[in-house]
Image (tube, rainbow, N blue to C red):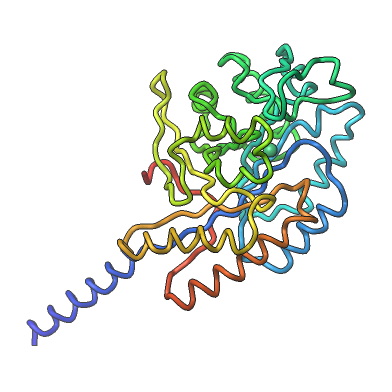
């Protein structure tokens, strides 16, 4: 009797442990807040999305540049942003080198490198500009000032202290990653496969700049620890399915399927997928993401792939 009881306990332990060792395809839905504008139509599209998918958390890459624009009304900006946030969301940081943000950080604004076209000059800058200037043009000390100032602005407005980051135009080189890690960031999600940008950005500098920076990034790239040249560590979480401005629902499904094939080879290990959209173009492109979610859920069901929508993997788990 005792022996049978022991077998029963062992079997129970085994089934519990194998249930815990089951991996999943973990899907992160990110939002890039460009720091450009907060139009009602885009916020409404996000509210509609939250209403229809209350179970999906969002990884927000918020932007402090809304607050540094001329005549910015901080309380209205904060109210607009918070109107589409949920407690389960992650509040990360996105930076584009807007002139007003750079200057309010105590840094001299630079006009290069532009990821749109060559020959951008200060004369091209009217009220605010700089969205297309890569962060890679700034020194480590300058970047740290811009990052710290962005955090300070967001903290003052009652947002969480960001630990995750995505660079404007995916432009995060070793220097940017080092400045982030030095400012306490544990995750960067700027790596993306350049080829997804080719149709829209092929005639601009961005395509080649992303290709040069993230040469090894593919649609099945997985999170990895990056060690900066000064020895700091940060988790690189590839935005492996890019953003819905450049991806149809079918395109994102294909990326999911490639990752699902890898998952099936070792179902005990989690596989990560990063999809997303921009707040500034939500009214136009959130429908691509809705379509992707529908297709991915159907495909996962048919192929018995366990999926879970999450906000971010933790650096210590890698
Ligand atoms: Zn951006």
Q: Quadrant of the C terminus?
A: top left
Q: Residue at x 58, y 53 (%)?
A: 275
Q: Residue at x 61, y 33 (%)?
A: 167
Q: Residue at x 46, y 41 (%)?
A: 217
**Vertical order, 116 against 45 (above or below):** above
Q: Is residue 263 left or right of residue 312?
A: left
Q: Residue 97 occupies which quadrant of the picture? A: top right
Q: Nearer the viewer, residue 267 or 53?
A: 267
Q: Residue 171 occupies which quadrant of the picture? A: top right
Q: Residue at x 62, y 50 (%)?
A: 30
Q: Position of residue 229 (x, y in %)?
A: 41, 20
**Vertical order, 60 against 228 (above or below):** below
Name of the residue lying farthest toward the right: 71
**Vertical order, 78 against 277 (above or below):** above
Q: Is residue 271 left or right of residue 298?
A: left
Q: Position of residue 16 (x, y in %)?
A: 29, 71
Name of the residue lying farthest toward the front: 203
């Amino acid at each position: 009797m005792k022996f049978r009881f022991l077998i029963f306990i062992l079997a129970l332990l085994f089934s519990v442990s194998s249930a815990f060792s089951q991996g999943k395809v973990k899907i992160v839905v990110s939002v890039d807040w460009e720091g450009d504008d907060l139009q009602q139509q885009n916020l409404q599209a996000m509210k509609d999305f939250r209403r229809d998918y209350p179970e999906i958390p969002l990884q927000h890459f918020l932007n402090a540049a809304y607050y540094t624009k001329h005549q910015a009304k901080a309380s209205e900006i904060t109210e607009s942003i918070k109107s589409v946030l949920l407690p389960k969301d992650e509040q990360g940081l996105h930076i584009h080198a807007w002139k007003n943000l750079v200057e309010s950080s105590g840094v001299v604004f630079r006009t290069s490198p532009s990821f749109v076209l060559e020959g951008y000059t200060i004369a091209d800058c009217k009220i605010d500009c700089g969205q297309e200037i890569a962060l890679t043009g700034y020194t480590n000390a300058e970047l740290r000032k811009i990052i710290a100032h962005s955090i300070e602005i967001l903290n003052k407005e009652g947002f969480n202290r960001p630990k995750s980051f995505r660079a404007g135009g995916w432009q995060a080189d070793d220097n940017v990653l080092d400045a982030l890690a030095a400012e306490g960031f544990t995750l960067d999600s700027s790596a993306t496969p350049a080829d997804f940008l080719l149709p829209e950005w092929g005639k601009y500098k961005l395509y080649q700049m992303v290709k040069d920076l993230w040469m090894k990034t593919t649609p099945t790239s997985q999170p990895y620890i990056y060690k900066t040249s000064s020895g700091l560590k940060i988790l690189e979480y590839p935005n492996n399915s890019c953003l819905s401005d450049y991806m149809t629902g079918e395109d994102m499904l294909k990326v999911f399927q490639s990752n699902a094939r890898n998952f099936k080879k070792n179902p005990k290990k989690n596989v990560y997928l990063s999809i997303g959209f921009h707040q500034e173009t939500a009214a136009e492109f959130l429908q691509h993401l809705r379509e992707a979610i529908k297709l991915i859920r159907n495909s996962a069901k048919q192929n018995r792939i366990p999926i879970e929508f999450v906000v971010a993997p933790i650096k210590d788990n890698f």
